[in-house]
Image (spheres, coloured by chain):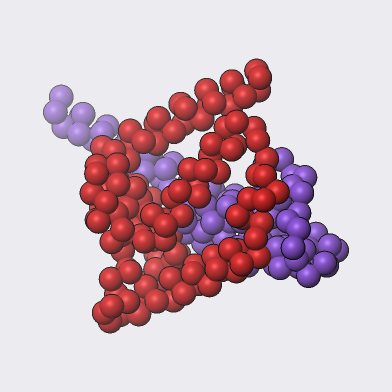
Amino acid sequence: MNNRFLRILFFTIAAGAILLLYFFVEPKNGILPKCFFHQLTGLYCPGCGVQRSFHALLNGHILTAINYNLLFILFLPLIIYFIILFLWGKKHPATSVIYRANFSMTVVIVVISFWVLRNLPFAPFSWLAP
Amino acid sequence: MTPPGPKGPFSENWLVEAILVTLLCCLPFGVVGIIFAAQVNTKLQAGDAEGAEKSRRDAAKWTKLGFWIGLACILLYVLFVFVLGVSFLGAAGSMSN
């Protein structure tokens, strides 16, 4: 119980700081870190645009958020579910969707396709680029 | 098809952790983690417990590697910006005084 309290306290402080930071700071202004993969290779990684997407989402611009990183928005429900389990100190139930072979294979295919397709320089794939 | 009983602290196959590293750490390591995490499930489903355990360790290895390298890059970046910011503020302060 005490452990859970500390975990929730620590998480609330960290999450609050991150939410405030991304609510107010526009990632395009160049203060926040840029993607190292993109800096090195010039290509977009699957996570490129997540910071801008998060900023847009916090400010209620859902379409802009999708435009910056569709994958992030798709995985957001899973990430929130994961955070709740973590805070509660619970394990994933054995029936959890993350243990299903079909689901995890779909994740592999979706992530790799997203990574490749968003680097193609023509429509409609260029819409996936941040 | 019986799903495995989780025995790790929060998750058994590292799938969500690998997804997070993929999205937040800007490195291809997270994608490798996702691939191994998926192998854990397919191997368990095929009854290959030993192979699943090996994939689980690989998924953990690549996910953690991506996490620590990503974190190190971000911290270095923050340090760099902080040093620049302090020197900039110092210069601005001395100009205005």
Where is residue A98? Give x, y as percent.
61, 55
Where is residue A104? Give x, y as percent.
60, 63
The vertical placement of A15 against A68, above or below, is above
Where is residue A106? Give x, y as percent.
55, 68
Check the rendered structure and report the hue given to chain B.
purple
The vertical placement of A120 against A44, above or below, is below
Residue B55 shows up from this direction = no
Q: Give the residue at x 31% y 63%.
A: A130
Q: Quarter of the image for the C terminus of chain B: give it.
A: top left
- Left-right relation of A90 to A35: right
Question: According to the colouring, which chain is red?
Answer: A
- Left-right relation of B33 to B25: right
The vertical placement of B10 against A45, above or below, is above
Q: Give the residue at x 71% y 40%.
A: B9
Outermost residue to the front? B1
Q: Quarter of the image for the N terminus of chain B: give it.
A: bottom right
Outermost residue to the left? B96
Q: Dividing the picture into quarters, in which one does residue A17 lie? A: top left
Where is residue A81? Give x, y as percent.
52, 43
Given residues B47 and B23, the one toward you in this image is B47
